[in-house]
Image: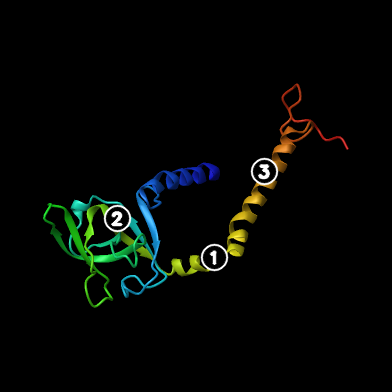
Amino acid sequence: MIFAAGLFVFISVIMSSRSGVPNLLGYSFFSVKTSSMVPTYPVGSVVITKKVNTNTLKAGDVITFYSDDPIISGIPNTHRIIAIGKDKEGKTYFITKGDNNPTADKYPVYEAKVIGKVQGSIGSLGSILGKFKNRYAMFFLLIVPIVLIVVFELKNITKLIKPGGKGEKTETGTEPENKE
């Protein structure tokens, strides 16, 4: 079951990564790196963003998006919608602002750049996860447990395959007695 769940998560992330941001069942998780949304989302918290139809967004909603600002281009950004407008071509855009920022963002956010609407957050999980980004922590948190699981499973498989091992039945359908 654990393998099936892991495989499901892996496939979901791979399939959704084609759209730019990995997500699981429409939800993406982002670590807050700056104080622009303090006190709503402090640095180190993780925001949970859900993919939504942009027609449902309204002023006051907090969204995660890709900004056209060259300084943060390609990096997901989370700010609050303060206004909605349409350009000359009829395309909808959102004016956003960080709760802790004195002014609105310089660049409007078009619908195609919206990743999703923030549904909530998880305290300081981002700070905790950030401590595990170095290669040694990842080695002990991921590689070592995986290797141990594989070794123990190989041992179990060899016991089942070996003649006289557990799981072997006699002609009568009962397990052999151990006569030592």
Query: Residue beneath label 3, please?
Result: 153
- Residue 132 - label: 1
Residue occupying the point 59% across, 56% down: 142
- Residue at 54% x, 65% y is 132
Query: Is 174 left or right of 35, judged from the image as shown?
Result: right
Q: Residue furthest top?
A: 171
Residue where numbered disc 2 is placed: 116
Q: Residue at x 70, y 38 (%)?
A: 157
Helix, strand, or loop for circle 1? loop
Instruction: Name the amino acid type tagged 1.
Output: Phe
Contact, CB < 8 Å: mark 2 with mark 3? no
Circle 3 residues within 10 Å: few <14, some 14–19, many ≥20: few
* Residue 15 occupies quadrant: top left
C-alpha distance separating marks 2 and 3: 40 Å
- Local SS, label 2: strand
- The amino acid on which the numbered mark 3 sits, given as a three-letter code, is Glu
